[in-house]
Amino acid sequence: MVKDDLLVIDRTYELVRWYLGRLGKFPRSQRYGLGQRIEGRLYDVLEGLIRAKYGSGPVKQATLADVNLNLEVLRMLSRLAHELAVLPHKSHEYAMREMDEIGRMVGGWLKQQRDRRASGTS
């Protein structure tokens, strides 16, 4: 799954780049609280995927599970930003589509790792 591993990392990298451009437009009252939390989670997801790429076995599975959790928190933070009217509707839709696709890729990668572990291969 090496090629797919790189695709999910590339998609996440592009989401981080895109989102960072939006965070700078948050009002000051939200930029340093909500904005920083979103930014931190974006970096956590990207870093987790890179760690998973180079990890193996149970470490890789645990890292991918952490990435899934960070993605879910990021979805909630994005929803909050949208509901507080600091993230426009179109931007929110785009972010959700990208996070859902990244989540599907991570889920597939995690399933593959579990199947490999169950069959006894690394």
Image (cartoon, helix red, strand yellow):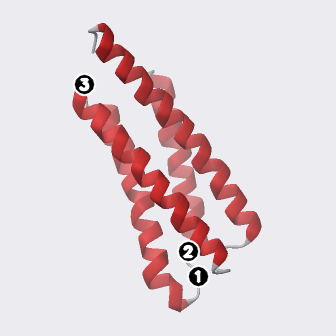
Residue 72 position, x and y percent, is 48, 53
Image coordinates for residue 80, horizontal then vertical, percent = 58, 72
- The residue mark sitting in front, 1 or 3, is 3
Q: Nearer the viewer, mark 3 or mark 2?
A: 3
Judge from the rendering whether residue 19 lies leftward or rightward of residue 116; answer left or right: right
Q: Residues within 10 Å of mark 1 (few under 14, many from 20)?
A: some
Is the C-beta separation of discs 2 and 1 under 8 Å? Answer: yes
Q: Where residue 119 sits in the image (x, y, percent)?
A: 32, 8
Question: In which quadrant of the rendered view does residue 78 lie?
Answer: bottom right
The tally of labels here is 3
Identify the mark nearer the N-term, 1 or 3. Answer: 1
Question: Is residue 55 or residue 89 the one in the foreground?
Answer: 89
Tag of residue 23: 2
Q: Of the residues shown, which amino acid type is indicated by label 1?
A: Phe
SS at circle 3: helix
Helix, strand or loop at mark 2: helix
**If you read the primary sequence from the N terminus, does the residue marked by circle 3 or circle 2 appear first?**
2
Q: Which residue is mark 3?
A: 57
- Residue at coordinates 76% horizontally, 64% vertically from top-left? 90
| Distance between mark 3 and mark 2 Cα atoms | 36 Å
The residue sitting at 31% across, 32% down in the picture is 61
Amino acid carrying mark 2 in the image? Leu
Q: Is residue 105 left or right of residue 113?
A: right
Q: In the figure, residue 56 lies in which quadrant?
A: top left
**Quick one: quadrant of the N terminus?**
top left
The x, y position of residue 94, in whole percent, is 70, 56
Using the image, determine if residue 16 lies above or below residue 5. below
CA gap between label 2 and label 1 equals 5 Å
Question: Where residue 26 is drawn, which disc sits there?
Answer: 1
Task: Count neighbours of disc 3 (C-alpha within 10 A) and say few if under 14, some if 14 to 19, many if 20 or more.
Answer: some
- What residue sits 52% from the left and 91% below the top? 29
